[in-house]
Amino acid sequence: MLQITVRLPDRLGKALERAKRRTRRRTSDIVRLALGEYLRIEVQRGERPADRVRGLIGSLASGIPDLAERHREHILESLKRGR
């Protein structure tokens, strides 16, 4: 495993410490997660979130023509039916 040393500005270091306390994770775990996310985003630069799921958009059919307009009613009805 590669080991590196990084110098952080005070604000970033303090934010890292807050995240460490809040999440109860080790500093190295938080840095690995953040770096991994940054590198994934960099590879996909210019790509919009919808581009990632383009193949899924419109691929599901609920059979309910007004689901978006009356979603609350449909959810309550499905809860009454036990679904």
Image: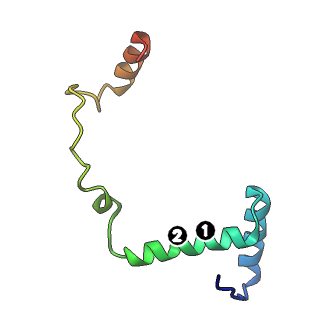
Q: Say which element carries label 1.
A: helix
Pick the quarter of the image with the N terminus: bottom right
Q: Can you give x and y, in whole percent of width and height, for residue 59 in the image?
A: 21, 43
C-beta proximity under 8 Å, tags 2 and 1:
yes
Q: Please name the residue shown 32% across and 61% down the image.
A: 52
User: Neighbour class for label 1 at 10 Å: few (<14), some, many (≥20)?
Assistant: few
Can you tell which quarter of the image residue 55 is in? bottom left
Q: Which amino acid does label 2 sit on?
A: Glu
Q: In this view, does 52 lie above or below 10?
A: above
Disc 2 marks which residue? 37
Q: Please name the residue shown 43% across and 13% down the image.
A: 82
Q: Please name the residue shown 39% across and 24% down the image.
A: 72
Q: Can you give x and y, in whole percent of width and height, for residue 32 in the image?
A: 63, 73
Spatial CA distance of label 2 from label 1 is 6 Å
> Quick check: 61 left or right of 23?
left
Q: Can you give x and y, in whole percent of width and height, for residue 67 in the image?
A: 28, 28
Report the coloring of the rendering. rainbow
Q: Say which element carries label 2.
A: helix
> Quick check: 14 left or right of 82?
right
Q: Please name the residue shown 77% across and 57% down the image.
A: 24
- Comparing 11 with 26, the one in front is 26
Tag of residue 13 = none
Can you tell which quarter of the image residue 7 is in? bottom right
> Quick check: 28 left or right of 76?
right
Disc 1 marks which residue? 33
Q: In this view, does 51 lie above or below 69?
A: below
Can you tell which quarter of the image residue 25 is in? bottom right
